Image (spheres, grey):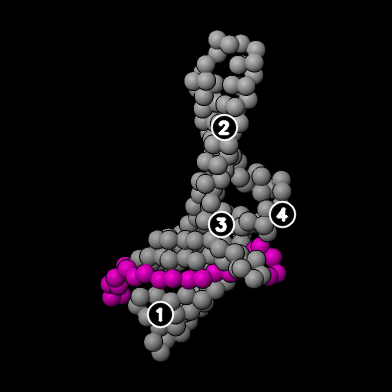
Amino acid sequence: MINLIPIGKVISLIAVVYAVICCLILWILWVAFDKNISFSSAISIATGGSLLLNALLLSLFYFGWRRLWKALPILNDLLFPDLNGTWDMVIHWEWGDKKGTSRANATIKQSFLKIGMDVEAEGSDSQTLVAKPKKDEETGRAVLYYVFLTTPKHKANFDEEAPYRGTAILKLSLKGKRILNGNYFTSRKTVGHYELTRIE
């Protein structure tokens, strides 16, 4: 989500504007009513206030954003939905002339600053290398670009397989915020389709 708005610039801009306004107001008031107050004292007070404002904004974005999203559900549509939680995953795969379906559990962990997904299947585990949320420019549909590393589980009577990387583009369903789906491909030349359903 943080990628959807330039949050660092927004926080810095708010802090700088706050510092300048406070500094000017304090200096004008104190010069008008108390000639002993210096400009540097006004700057010191305004800087302390801007640091406090920065800390409050960072706390809101890092810890309180989910409460804000619950209180104002429209933010799910305006910015990006809260995808936190456990998802039931169906994997439709093709590897050479073989095809099949397997099931897995996916856990999405999302903060205002980052997002990641871990997938645990019967034969492998997968972890996020890079995940980037995005909104479709035309429709506003939520999309998750996901690059992952899959590590096969070594089991008896099976050949040992090396870890491999993959990429998926997952789109939030038009039917609601409980379904993600999209195609994927991997470095070992497998392709397929993911279907994720949020477990309440």
Spatial CA span between label 2 and label 4: 33 Å
Gap between marks 3 and 1 measured at Cα: 31 Å
Q: Quadrant of residue 123?
A: bottom left
Which amino acid type is shown beneath numbered disc 3? Leu
Q: Which label sits in the foreground, 1 or 4?
A: 4
The span from disc 1 to disc 4 (Cα, nearest Å) is 38 Å
Please report whichever mark, 4 or 3, sits nearer to the chain's N-terminal start.
3
Q: Is residue 165 magenta?
A: yes
Query: Depth-wise, is mark 3 or mark 1 nearer the camera?
Result: 3
Q: Mark 3 or 2, which is nearer the eye?
A: 2
- The residue tagged 3 is 4
**Horizontal arrangement in the rendering, residue 151 relative to residue 77 (left or right):** left
Disc ID at residue 20 = 2
In the image, residue 86 lies at what x, y percent? 56, 57
Residue to which mark 4 is pinned: 74
- What is the crowding at mark 1: few (fewer than 14 residues within 10 Å), some, or many (at least 20)? some
For marks 2 and 4 on the same chain, the one whose residue lies earlier in the sequence: 2
Q: Is 153 a magenta residue?
A: yes
Residue 111 visible within the image: no
Name the N-terminal-most of marks 1 and 4: 4
**Residue at horizontal 56 percent and vertical 45 percent from the top:** 10
Instruction: Return the residue nearer the eye: 81 or 121.
Output: 81
Q: Quadrant of the N terminus?
A: bottom right
Range shown magenta? 152-179
- Name the mark on residue 133: none
Identify which amino acid the numbered label 4 is placed on: Ile
What's the distance in space between the residues labelled 1 and 2, CA to CA?
57 Å
Q: Split into 4 quadrants, where in the image is the C terminus? A: bottom right
Residue 32 lies left or right of residue 5; in this view the side is: right
Going from N to C along the chain, the mark reached first, 3 or 1, is 3
Mark 2 surroundings: few (<14), some (14-19) or many (≥20) residues within 10 A: some
Q: Secondary structure at mark 3?
A: helix
